[in-house]
Image (cartoon, grey):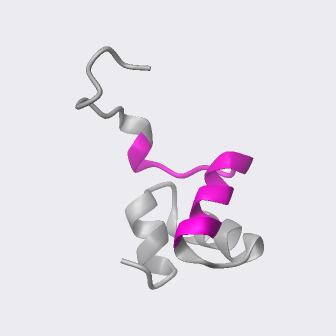
């Protein structure tokens, strides 16, 4: 955990195919695991682009 909770690390902007990342996208975008994985592969690692790909801005 960071010393200053107001500071956010770079990682928050990226999505990976790690299980906890996929679970976060499934929960927030309300899509299936397969759709989330496809979105990460197609849109790239940017979490914003993944959500845009899924139509959830």
Q: In the image, what residue occupies the spot 26% across and 20% down?
A: 4
Q: In the image, what residue occupies the spot 60% across and 78% down?
A: 30
Residue 12, x across and y down, in percent:
41, 44
Our reading of the magenta stretch's main secondary structure is: helix
Judged from this view, the residue extending furthest toward the bottom is 55
Q: Is residue 51 above or below residue 17?
A: below
> How many numbered markers are drawn?
0
- Residue 39 is left or right of residue 11, and the answer is right
Residue 50, x across and y down, in percent:
49, 68
Q: In the image, what residue occupies the spot 36% across and 36% down?
A: 10
Q: In the image, what residue occupies the spot 62% across and 51% down?
A: 21
- Residue 36 is left or right of residue 29, and the answer is right
Q: Quadrant of residue 56?
A: bottom left
Q: Quadrant of residue 11?
A: top left
Q: Is residue 50 above or below residue 47?
A: below
- Residue 30 is left or right of residue 57, and the answer is right
7 part of magenta stretch: no
Q: Is residue 57 above or below residue 18?
A: below
In the picture, the quarter occupied by the C terminus is: bottom left
Q: Is residue 44 above or below residue 52?
A: above
21 part of magenta stretch: yes
Residue 49, x across and y down, in percent:
41, 68
Q: Which residues are magenta?
A: 12-28
Judged from this view, the residue extending furthest toward the top is 3
Residue 1, x across and y down, in percent:
44, 20
- Residue 47 is left or right of residue 29, and the answer is left
């Amino acid at each position: 955990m960071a010393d200053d909770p107001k500071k956010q690390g770079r990682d928050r902007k990226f999505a990976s195919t790690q299980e906890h990342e996929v679970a976060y996208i499934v929960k927030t975008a309300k899509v299936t695991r397969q759709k989330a994985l496809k979105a990460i592969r197609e849109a790239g690692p940017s979490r914003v682009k993944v959500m845009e790909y899924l139509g959830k801005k």
